[in-house]
Amino acid sequence: MLRLPINERDGWQTKAEEFGFKFHTMYGDQYWDESAYYQFSLKQIEQDLEAPTEEIHKMCLAVVDKVINDDALMTKFCIPESHWDFIRQSWLNGDPSLYSRLDFAYSGTGPAKLYENNADTPTSVYETGFWQWLWLQDNVDNNTLNKRSDQFNSLQEKLVNRFADIQFLTPDRQLHFACCKGTDEDRGTVQYLEDCANAAGITTKFVYIEDIGRDADGNFTDLDNQVISWMFKLYPWEFMMQEEFGEFLGTNNIRWIEPPWKSILSNKALLPMLWKLFPDHPNLLPAFFEDELDQAQGIDRLVKKPIFSREGANISFLTNKNGTFVAEENSQQSSSSDGPYGEEGYIYQAAHMLPQFGQNHTLIGSWLVDDQAAGISMREDSGPITQDMSRFIPHIIL
Amino acid sequence: MKRTQFINLDLMRKIKPKFLLRPIALGVTAALLSACGNDQEVKIVSSVDDCVSSTSLDLEQCEIAYKNALAEAEKTGPKYQTINACESEFGAGQCVQSQNQSIFMPLMAGFMINELLFNRDRRSYGGYYNPVYRYYRPYSPYHNTMMMADGTSLGKYGKKSYNVSKSATKQKPMVSRTVSRGGFGSVASAKSNWGGGSKSKGWGG
């Protein structure tokens, strides 16, 4: 695994415009960065990332199966009791999932270590599935990169195929896509998935999360008052369950992507549960609930993560000082991150720092479409915690 | 190869080149699609009696189909300001005033049945009850053809069965009366106000 410099493609910004990639630069900062790329060997990809990704996914499903049948664990996962049935039914029905992204720390040698599972609302899917694919294609075509260069990225192909499979299970319904207002990134992500669904022959429609209505029977409606019967939402389940319309979830006949049982996987409580069920697994980091910190005595440093949190928000570090974990000074902005999460409680994970390539701390997002590993995305940050503005860097296999 | 084999860049482009020869490409696609089994064979029956005698549906099923097709015709059928305008297209005596409005609509000439969508065990019909009209404007190339409410021509009147696209018998989206909006999104909105508007791209992760 190498980080190599490369010339940017001439006029790629114009091309981004043409293909509707609007969020390559945000708040004046570069998000898509093609001044460098990572190079992997096929063995690194297949043995160290692809295989563990599919294995961890299976382990995660085992966690769902355990948690769903256990009221005490449902409580530990901070899932509102009013929605337990809704979630359980979706699991028992076998409601199909579309995609997930596992985040790993991996340096090129040794086992990749799982940071978390973005199973409910994973983003950067457009940059991964399409835009970095195009980057490779262009650079091979203009002889900048070796003709034999490949990429671990079958994401778009697998998404289209998966949409076709799910449609077979949900025939004759129109698929509504939804995300929040005021974010180019989410709107772009949803547009991309809508394009993939269309390519699979599904008829689609878009509605903003804030514009969803309900009728007297509790059905959800779009702005044309059309009843929603099948919906992809880029909006976290834990938000929806606590909002005004949350009480109608499960009472109306809607098929959801992602399905409600994904709320158990996108939850950081997954991490201590994985460690409990699969202790010492090479791809897992030791992780604990708040009331289990006595089991963490052999560990020098812990990361404290809110049970519900997205893109590295509200994360801090603790040091083991003679058997007590003490919050590290936040004087260094780089070792703790701000954000709006944490009310619901925290979990603790053994600190395992991201590998550094020069000044960059590099995180690997490994994609799953249903249960198949489908490619990776690389994110870089100047600090140790990857956040939503961290740069996206393409990669190749050679 | 570990990557997607082929992506049709034309489909991914959000700004389309202006002088693309689209209609020709589209025409070819449509022909290919219908060759790939996107069609189905349906019968068009003119009444409940005709339905019972020409299809495998029983009387009760045929009555339900008829009533639903009538209701659908009232909602989606062609509408005209004057009876003359309507009769010029559908023939003398073939138009009526709509129940509650001052508009005129052609009489439903029949309704579509796909017997394959009829589930014998559960005694249910998995399709949409599509009303059909008989277009009658003299000298029109569509004179005496069977037509759906949106103007799609199905073929000459009087055939035993018709080939139509599968979407013709698909359930149409249900429309309802919305009593309130804005019941989702409040948590995101509260969190994005946090810290005086932090740099954030979205609510995914």
Image (tube, coloured by chain):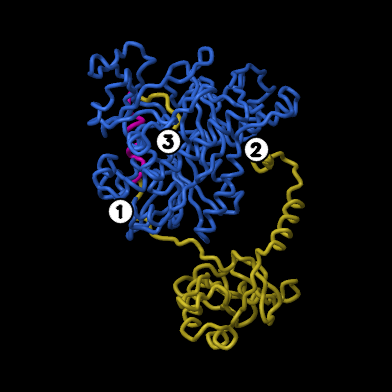
Chain colours: A blue, B yellow
**How far is the residue under mark 1 from the one under mark 2?**
45 Å
**Residue A170 versus residue B153 in the image, above or below:** above
Q: Position of residue A247 (x, y in %)?
A: 29, 51
Tag nearer the camera, 3 or 1: 3
Confirm whether the magenta stretch covers residue A137: no
Q: Amino acid at mark 3?
A: Asn
Tag nearer the camera, 1 or 2: 1
Quarter of the image with the N terminus of chain A is top right
Nearest the camera: B56 or A225? B56
User: Magenta part of the protein: which range?
Assistant: B183-195
Label 1: chain?
A: A
- Element marked by disc 2: loop
User: Mark 2 and mark 3, same subunit?
Assistant: no
- Element marked by disc 3: strand
Dominant secondary structure, magenta: helix
Q: Which residue is mark 3?
A: A117
**Callout 1: 10 Å neighbours few (<14), some, many (20+)?**
few
Q: Which residue is mark 1?
A: A85
- Residue pictured at 44% horizontal, 61% vertical: B175
Q: Position of residue B124 (x, y in %)?
A: 47, 75
Can the viewer see residue B80 in this picture? no
Nearest the camera: A55 or A103? A55
Q: Amino acid at mark 2?
A: Ile
Please, which residue is most extreme toward the top here?
A331
**How far is the residue under mark 2 from the one under mark 3?**
35 Å
Q: Which mark is residue B15?
A: 2
Confirm whether the magenta stretch covers residue B191: yes
Q: Position of residue A314 (x, y in %)?
A: 34, 25
Q: Amino acid at mark 1?
A: Asp
- Residue pictured at 56% horizontal, 41% vertical: A192
* B68 on left or right of B26: left
